[in-house]
Amino acid sequence: MMTNESVSVLEALPTVAGVLGDETDRAERHPLGDGLSAYVIKQPGAALTRTVHNRVYEALIPVTTSSFGADMTLYWAQRSKEGYLERLAEFVLVEGAGGAIVGWTGFHVLPYGDRTLIYLDSTGMVPTQQSRGVMRELMRRRVHDSGIPSCPAGRPVHITARSESPVFYRLMRGLLDGATLYPDSETPPPSDILESARLLAGWLGQTDLLNEETLALQNAYSNLDELYGELPTTGDAALDTLFRERLGPLDAYLLVGRVASSR
């Protein structure tokens, strides 16, 4: 049940229609249940105009600030300079009550000579929508129904991300259908996982930050004072320890897991 305070927060958030404007019809709309919808934009760099890109970046500031509990203005200023939207294979906005943006996600498809990396980029939901399984199901649908089928046939596919959140780690582990997600507290990364981590660190421009034994990136978010107002926790002592005791406040892990290609 939503409180008056949570309704007020949603009313203050930008809307999907207000951000996408006349380009809303370029998105695929998918119902998610409970009054939520996903607006999927494939190749947003080509599909959306620069004006809409700018509106998206502005809109994501309050949505991510609400999600992470920390001011994300500098984060999105940096991501816009990096061409976040321009490089994505898919971008997704989650619409809630009254049309408000209550979540977002997106991924890149990075083909290399002997493998393909699906990189899950910035992802989150506002607090009123967290811990309901919506984002987990949405990401699973997008990765398995769209991301993996778009990868070149005959090559291993690794799902990857950069995160300092054990909650996101647990979500991502659910995308792998039982395959191991690294870093793993009991097993060092094998050679193929380590090579994918090196490739991803290079793509992120953070090769010099990578600890190959732990897959940690030291000072990965150097442009921020903090990424979370309060560090997420799962209640899984081993998993929470993996993040809380081994990462500094601006560090992150490269998360890498191999999946079987459906092609």
Image: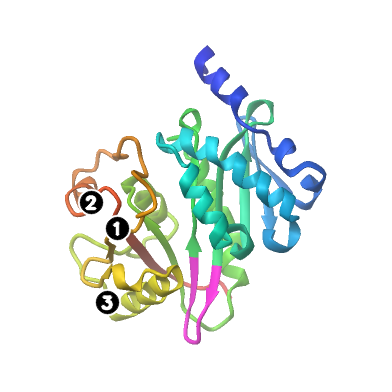
State the extent of the magenta-drawn residues as a range. 109-118
Q: Could you give the CA–CA distance between mark 3 and mark 2, rounded to whole angstroms?
A: 24 Å
Q: Could you give the CA–CA distance between mark 3 and mark 1, rounded to whole angstroms?
A: 24 Å
Q: Quadrant of residue 179?
A: bottom left
Q: State the residue position of label 1.
A: 219
Q: Residues within 10 Å of mark 3 (few under 14, many from 20)?
A: few
Disc nearer the start of the sequence (3/1): 3
Q: Residues within 10 Å of mark 2 (few under 14, many from 20)?
A: some
Q: Quadrant of residue 211?
A: bottom left
Q: Is residue 111 above or below residue 254?
A: below
* Horizontal arrangement in the rendering, residue 66 relative to residue 216 (left or right): right
In depth, the one of 239 and 25 nearer the eye is 25
Name which residue type carries label 2.
Answer: Gly
Q: State the residue position of label 2.
A: 248
Residue 87 drawn at (x, y percent): 60, 65
Disc nearer the start of the sequence (1/2): 1
In the rendered image, which quarter contains the C terminus?
bottom right
Name which residue type carries label 3.
Answer: Pro
Circle nearer the viewer, 3 or 2: 2
Which numbered dot is residue 34? none
Name which residue type carries label 1.
Answer: Asn
